Amino acid sequence: MPKKPPTLSENGMVLPELLAPAGHLEALWAALENGADAVYVGLKQFSARAHAANFTLDELARLLPFTRRRGVAVYVALNCLVTASEIPSILDTLQALSDLGVDAVIVQDPGLFFLCRHHFPTLPLHASTLTAVHNSSGVNVLEKLGARRIVLARELTLEEIQAIRRKTQAELEIFVHGALCYSISGLCLASSFHGGHSGLQGRCVQPCRLRYRQDRRSGYFFSCSDFSALAHLHHLRKLGLAALKIEGRMKDAEYIATVVRAYRHVLDTPDEGVHAAVEEARNWLARAPARRLTEAFFGVDPSREILSPHRSGSSGLWVATIKRSDPKGLQVDLRHSVRVGDRLRPESTEGKEAPPVVLDGIQAQDGTFIAETSAQGTVLLTTRPPLELSKGARLFRIGRKPSPINKLWEAIDRDGSRPLSYRHRWNRPEVHEDHLFPGLFNVRRQATSLWMKIRSLSDLGRAMSSPAHKVWLVASRENLEKMAKKHLHGAQKERFGWALPPVLFEKDVDYYRKAVAWYVAKGYRAWEVNNWSHLDWIFEDDKLFLVAGSRMNVRNKAAMAALAEAGCRCVVLSWEITRDELRQIIADPVPSVPVVSIYGRPSLFLSRIQPPLLENRPVRTPRGEAYVYRKEGALAVLYADRPCNWFEKIPELEAMGYRLFLMDLAEGSTPLEPGQWERLLSGYERRRADAPYSLFNYDRKPIPDSRGKEPGLPDHERKVEHLSERD
């Protein structure tokens, strides 16, 4: 059955689609029952919410006839980065989704754009918010790549969304409710750096929720409140947006029901009644488990409104305060009703949320046992497992006892539609993986070369005097304008390249479009792109030398092929890449020349939110992990206290077949002193790293332990931890 026609307001205006999360069957049911036009679901693999229950392909085959009979679209989120070894299984998954005819697939990885465009052209694609689209140029490029809809970054203001809407006819989707990440969408490496649990793979362990300490101050400096655009809904519905999206695939059905109902109510209310509708909807949301709500970047002062540095940011509805804890249970003062089976969580003092418990029993003051309380009063609670909490501690309800899943499936099956059929294997087994991608380069035949990237124009002389075969300079406005007054002769221009910044907002687009054109006309041919938007400013010219930077997050050969088609001859592989992936990617021939970052201090958090911290001072977690904060223009940046250094791995990388290596000096907590330049170049020549340093994910598994346990530190990192205390 086709998707239902667009929802119209009373005056005939087409309303944006209300898109709800469905991390499990009960949540999907709640979304449908409360007015969602569409839902997005994840599979057991390849989802950016790997810890949600998610769905199997067989379950999806049973669900789709049911949702279609109700005119509700189902989008499948394959929005995590794909590692090199996962290409065969992702092809099988895409074949199944193509057979099932899902309404769209939400993707982040460049490789999925390539595979769908070439092998599954009937699959509609939505570009995930993790593609980091901050401007209309990014929309233009992703639309050319085959994206039917682009989900804009969550860090945009209302004015920026309006400006992008005016400049494109593409379908645009924005988030309107739910949790916020501190770091900019698609650019966070913090969870991966300590432990290998990449947020870009859907395995984030939420380091932004920890309590940090700087000097004598401590707080939840990066913990964000939850977003609610409810007050702006009457304006958003008039912008011509395709969809308004609610975050929350980890949430329970009651939360989904409440939030969808609230937004449906306001969306459907005529202009003259919208103020009263918003107030009514806010009252409903006040009873939904969540963090403190904020208007985020739609507000006047986003940093002040989003951050809650003096609160843990624990999610859930504050339902009770502890009066006394004893062997019999917890005596509490109630703020909201609770019932047996509720999932509760005590507020954490460390920031990382405490494990949940189940409410096992409720005893009223007269000694009787009850199944549910009133909204106020004093009762005795018992939990499974038991809790011991101090007086004044707070309990949050994070979920209700779920309905029996079997009964929901029975209701779906009674609907009368038979499950859809699909193939479990890719329909073109005769195409070997080695022949999936156009092989253009045999990198083993090349000589080993060093590239160097710098941040300041003042370092250009030293970089040009180094053994680097290519020198990249960050294309900041300051550097672009100062460089215009300098003159490089032909050989210098051959060695020189511009590295475009990964985050540029709509106000920057015209400036950078003109700057790129001006420099190209002056003979500057080498450009490193770090966001899809950059490809909108690079004019078609066979003489240009384009490189995809590390922020394009390439971890598989399909992604290399996608960027080769976009004109990139070389690809700097992701900072998160592992040894196992490196071995698989290098098999000749390759679609583009891979570049390995062997030194650098990449930003772990890159944010538009300014925390209440001092620059260039250590910021530590309870476990002693140290970071350094800097403000760089309009962005806040958090770096690790040590660089990534793979100098000792160069012989192994060369044996694999790698020939191009990048020393990235463009990011870091402080500029390099003259003596450090010599030590780094000496370390490169000697293939030895000076402690303290990190290997990042080099020795880790491409896909970490699914139980979320952090592997032990490699020996060199244990040594470095000891040295860092001394240093």
Image (tube, rainbow, N blue to C red):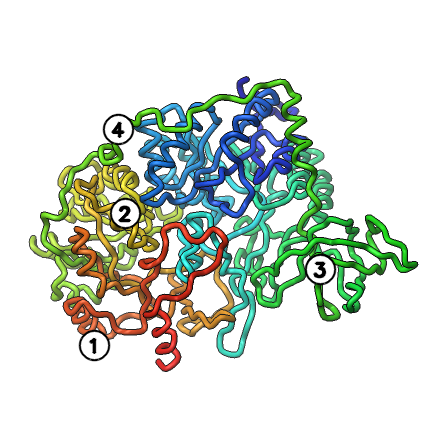
Measured along the vertical axis of the image, is residue 244 above or below residue 401?
A: above
Quadrant that contains the C terminus = bottom left
Instruction: Identify the residue under disc 3.
Output: 395
**Where the N terminus falls, by quadrant?**
top right
Q: Are marks 2 and 1 in contact (CB under 8 Å)?
A: no
Front position among marks 2 and 3: 3
Q: Are marks 3 and 1 in contact (CB under 8 Å)?
A: no
Label 1 sits on residue: 675
Q: Residue at x 32, y 73 (%)?
A: 692
Find the distance from the CA under tag 3 to the CA under tag 4: 56 Å
- Percent from the top left, x then y, of residue 485? 18, 58
Q: Which mark is residue 431?
A: 4
Under mark 1, the amino acid is Gly
Q: Residue 167's image quarter? A: top left
Callout 3, which amino acid?
Leu
Res. 5 visible in picture:
no
Residue 595 visible to an observer of this rendering: yes
Mark with earlier residue (2, 3): 3
Q: Position of residue 458 (x, y in %)?
A: 22, 67
Position of residue 21 in the picture relative to residue 581 (left or right)? right
> Marks 2 and 3, how far apart in space?
47 Å
Disc nearer the start of the sequence (3/4): 3
Q: Secondary structure at mark 4?
A: loop
Q: Secondary structure at mark 1?
A: helix
Q: Amino acid at mark 4?
A: Val
